[in-house]
Image (cartoon, helix red, strand yellow):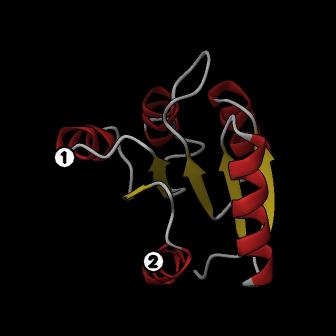
Amino acid sequence: MPVKNILVVDDSPTERFFATDLLTKAGYQVSTAENGEEGIAKAKATKPDLILMDVVMPGLNGYQATRTLTRDEETKNIPVIVCTTKGQETDKIWGLRQGAADYIVKPVNPEELLKKIAALP
């Protein structure tokens, strides 16, 4: 199933704007959430085809939100790509262990992100 609707979960207005602008220009429909809790609620309500998840956020962080989403019957089939400034190999391994389909380090390379989205099953 091709990706059409993407949920961007990031506490930074700048990052949400960048991702929304990039993805809408590439033909995707985009919705946003400002934190992990809102991201989980929106994912359950709207069932996006993909979630782009920041890690460093107040309240529920991106690892916790990803783990919650990928272990919930309602949302476990929605792929999550973690997009974060946390670039250590251990951070990436931890993100993938939480159930993320992929992991991208900010600043996001637009072409790399679009390729990863296109490559999703």
Under circle 2, the secondary element is helix
Under circle 1, the secondary element is helix
Residue at (60% x, 43% y) in the render: 74
The residue that mark 2 highlights is: 112
Quadrant location of residue 54?
top right
Q: Where's the C terminus, which quadrant?
A: bottom left
Amino acid type, label 1 = Glu
Q: Would you say residue 64 is visible in this rendering?
A: yes
Residue at (44% x, 75% y) in the render: 116
What label does residue 89 carry, if any?
A: 1
Quadrant location of residue 110?
bottom right
Residue at (74% x, 34% y) in the render: 34
Percent of width and height locating residue 59: 61, 15
- Does label 2 or label 1 sit earlier along the sequence? 1
Quadrant location of residue 22?
bottom right
- In this rendered view, identify the residue nearer to me: 92 or 74: 92
Cα–Cα gap, marks 2 and 1: 18 Å
